[in-house]
Image: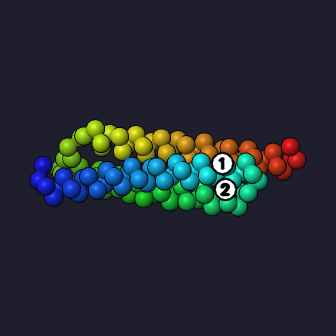
């Protein structure tokens, strides 16, 4: 792999890891805010998490497009790790949305 391609792939992979971590952190902050009854903050944090996931998805799409065009990326442990980060962040975000909704429902019912 040429040095330039390697650097570009490393930047993409690190972006996936960072965006995945940020998405998960924002989702966790949403749960904490909802736990305190701060539902506006919780909703903002879920939206923030979603934006990090959109950024990650765009990077993934770019990688897939290059692959489809014959620019095969070398699969490294770091690349696998980045994909794992994204999948965990997506799962955590989905679960956080459900937990925030549950806290809202409990608050509405006065429990």
- Direction from residue 29 to residue 51 in the image, left or right: left
Q: Which mark is residue 1?
A: none
Disc 2, disc 1: CB below 8 Å? yes
Which type of secondary structure does the marked residue at label 1 adopt? helix
Q: Position of residue 82 (x, y in %)?
A: 36, 45
Say few, some or many: other residues with alpha carbon within 10 Å of mark 2 (under 14 / 14 to 19 / 20 or more): many
SS of the residue under disc 2 = helix
Display colour scheme: rainbow
Q: Residue furthest left?
A: 2
Picture coordinates of residue 56, whole percent (x, y): 41, 54
As drawn, which residue projects farthest toward the right? 110
| Residue 57 appears in the picture as rendered | no
Between 98 and 9, the one nearer to me in the picture: 9
Q: Is residue 77 above or below residue 31?
A: above
Relative to 102, residue 42 above or below: below
* Residue, disc 2: 42
* Residue in view at x 30 percent, y 55 percent: 12
Q: Residue at (64%, 52%) from the top-left corner?
A: 30
Q: How busy is the neighbourhood of tag 1: few (under 14 within 10 Å), some, or many (20 plus)? A: many
Q: Which residue is mark 1?
A: 31
Q: Is residue 11 left or right of residue 44?
A: left
Number of residue marks: 2
The quadrant of the rendering that contains the C terminus is top right
Q: Position of residue 108 (x, y in %)?
A: 84, 50
Q: Which residue is rendered at x = 73% and y = 57% of the image?
A: 38
Q: Position of residue 24 (x, y in %)?
A: 52, 48
Q: CA distance from mark 2 to mark 1?
A: 7 Å
């Amino acid at each position: 792999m040429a040095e330039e391609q390697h650097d570009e792939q490393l930047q993409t992979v690190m972006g996936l890891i960072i965006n995945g971590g940020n998405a998960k952190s924002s989702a966790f902050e949403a749960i904490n805010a909802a736990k305190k009854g701060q539902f506006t903050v919780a909703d903002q944090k879920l939206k923030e998490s979603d934006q990090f996931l959109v950024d990650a998805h765009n990077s993934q799409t770019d990688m897939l497009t290059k692959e489809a065009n014959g620019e095969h990326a070398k699969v490294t442990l770091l690349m696998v790790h980045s994909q794992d980060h994204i999948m965990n962040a997506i799962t955590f975000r989905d679960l956080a949305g459900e937990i925030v909704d549950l806290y809202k429902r409990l608050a509405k019912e006065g429990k």
